[in-house]
Image (cartoon, helix red, strand yellow):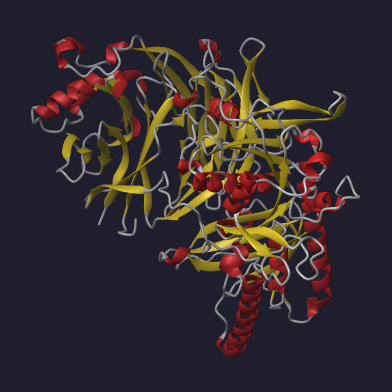
Amino acid sequence: MKHFCSSSVSEDLGCRRGDFSRKHYGSVELLISSDADGAIQRAGRFRVENGSSDENATALPGTWRRTDVHLENPEYHTRWYFKYFLGQVHQNYIGNDAEKSPFFLSVTLSDQNNQRVPQYRAILWRKTGTQKICLPYSPTKTLSVKSILSAMNLDKFEKGPREIFHPEIQKDLLVLEEQEGSVNFKFGVLFAKDGQLTDDEMFSNEIGSEPFQKFLNLLGDTITLKGWTGYRGGLDTKNDTTGIHSVYTVYQGHEIMFHVSTMLPYSKENKQQVERKRHIGNDIVTIVFQEGEESSPAFKPSMIRSHFTHIFALVRYNQQNDNYRLKIFSEESVPLFGPPLPTPPVFTDHQEFRDFLLVKLINGEKATLETPTFAQKRRRTLDMLIRSLHQDLMPDLHKNMLNRRSFSDVLPESPKSARKKEEARQAEFVRIGQALKLKSIVRGDAPSSLAASGICKKEPWEPQCFCSNFPHEAVCADPWGQALLVSTDAGVLLVDDDLPSVPVFDRTLPVKQMHVLETLDLLVLRADKGKDARLFVFRLSALQKGLEGKQAGKSRSDCRENKLEKTKGCHLYAINTHHSRELRIVVAIRNKLLLITRKHNKPSGVTSTSLLSPLSESPVEEFQYIREICLSDSPMVMTLVDGPAEESDNLICVAYRHQFDVVNESTGEAFRLHHVEANRVNFVAAIDVYEDGEAGLLLCYNYSCIYKKVCPFNGGSFLVQPSASDFQFCWNQAPYAIVCAFPYLLAFTTDSMEIRLVVNGNLVHTAVVPQLQLVASRVKFNQKICTRFHLETSWAEASNDL
């Protein structure tokens, strides 16, 4: 049984990443604080998020919606060892890389979320960090440790990895995973009266106010510390030395303890309130609740003397309108994190404000751990733990704890003679692992998604059934109005819900690529028939007229007038997706690129046949051949990038061999963009995005995705510039297709969809969909606001579970 399903993302999503990140994640400012006499106290550079300052912000992309609020890199999806390995049969290996640095490898065969999709999961523990990947399972093909490490770009070793049999290794590996960050959080809450300009004044507030207490009640529950058995966040739960009460909550599996300034011990003799500062000053994230009118002197992070706090959330409560206003200050080294603040950053629904604030604070602390200061400390700790564990295991090299069956099949069948012994070993291994898992759960350190999760909301990627019982294999497709134009083994069909499919072209025209350009009244497609492959162009209005006249599907011979002759033998083509000035098409014929443009555009949205004469039924004459560009090899991936202004700034990104290059459309000169350091390269996509009005590219290959900014300089040359917003990440599974639907990146594999944020590459969701096939993705430009679009993704899948 086949289904076509569609998943839609809100129309308010931004079209270009530069506008999105710059306007909705704030800008870095130098903030200077002074005392009551005007003397400068401290200064610091912070990124200030205050919503968009644009007067037309309500119509701009990135305006907050409830569906934008996601925990980034949620532990339930990222803590693999706890979730998939601990307490389960799995294998662990130890080895040294070519630089003699030790590493550990954990491998298990698991069923993906009980969806009947067996697959291998592997975790590589190295001093530089942890890498996680999924590999497909085949009952007829064994998988070796060497091939797993090769997939992780680790091809050279000092010696072959050996298996560790000792069950206590699970405890050590769990400690390594916990270095990624705490599951639970402690946040400071500082009460500031109107007009207070120094941290001594703020910390000296003995009690709060009624609005402050109302805010604390919104954050969580007031608990008695003495005898408290949950997460304590560094507070004393035995002798009341850190206060009698505190505020605590659980959010989406995370325990959160708030260090509330007015609940921590107060000293009349100590003006600096050291005991209060000792806790709040050592929190990465602090909420500052400031009373007073908005016109009053505003809080600045430089007012607080702390080298540890990186993020401040300024909260103001408006009693007259019963709403909260939020402003975020992040130390400039903290990477961008979501959700972006609404415009204006005012919340009338208090529960929505609580959800937004907690997600923002949790994401902010995780982002802070990626700053150089924290990342270097984490790497040193991880390196120390790995080396220490390696040294502890080495003496047991000859005691059956380490196995010399390096590169054996993963999860090998035991010999009959040793089956009982192996079964007993595995049972003990599992028993110890399950005891460790239970202990972590009781201790409150277990990643979980079963706890309170806030407001129930509809996610933007929730699927909608488009067509059930589709009987054909889909090759490619593109939306046409409310219908879907689908290329199949039976020809090209127009599919509309569960209505009978309408043939548009018969099977003599085997279409491999297509673009429906409704605003240009055009259909562009590549029909692949070996050396006779060509590009064809059609008027949608002419095709629509034929469908209304109940004409049979067109054959290849019926399309002779629609061929672009010079494209014979093409194996790939690309069009510019932001064709505001003109439509450009680049066609790849082996190692040759052919640049084609449309001479003139018809009025937007032309569909009336009354405007067409019989001579203009084919649009071929409207296209002109501009130039040929020769490459050193045939491109596997190709993307067009619009320049900011002039035609000479237009680029072609091509991927071949082990590299991504950018080619100047005007001169044909190629510049190296990125070299791939891997033995085998599977190019997936090059996606054009924009940072501050300049071109940038997301380069996707194997498991990797890297952002590169490209700037024109010196009359036609191009420079790859490092940017503060650059990032690189790895997919958990190797995708075969990637779609950009701002603010999301959607990666498709044969049985799952992985969703991350464009602005930082952070994971927000993974969906298991057996036998998943991406068929089409479409950018629909809003007629009134050209920077807004609605992306519809359609896929075919062979399961009723979606």
Horizontally, residue 43 falls left or right of residue 483, namely: right
Please report the residue visible at 50 percent of the width from the left and 48 percent of the height from the top: 351
Please report the residue visible at 41 percent of the width from the left and 19 percent of the height from the top: 579
Residue 100, above or below 524 = below
Q: Nearer the viewer, residue 165 or 621?
A: 165
Residue 226, above or below 652 = below
Residue 448, position in %: x, y?
Answer: 56, 63
Count the labels in the image.
0
Residue 756, above or below 80 = above
Q: Nearer the viewer, residue 740 or 320?
A: 320
Q: Quadrant of residue 329?
A: top right
Image quarter where the N terminus lies is bottom left
Q: Is residue 738 visible?
A: no
Please report the residue visible at 21 percent of the width from the left and 19 percent of the height from the top: 607
Residue 79, position in %: x, y?
Answer: 61, 60
Horizontally, residue 667 falls left or right of residue 746, namely: right
- Taking the view exactly as shown, the residue that stands out farthest to the right is 269
Q: Is residue 401 visible?
A: yes
Residue 360, position in %: x, y?
Answer: 60, 44
Q: Nearer the viewer, residue 487 or 324?
A: 324
Q: Quadrant of residue 561?
A: top left
Image quarter where the C terminus lies is bottom left
Residue 288, position in %: x, y?
Answer: 70, 41
Horizontally, residue 525 falls left or right of residue 49, namely: left
Q: Quadrant of residue 336?
A: top right
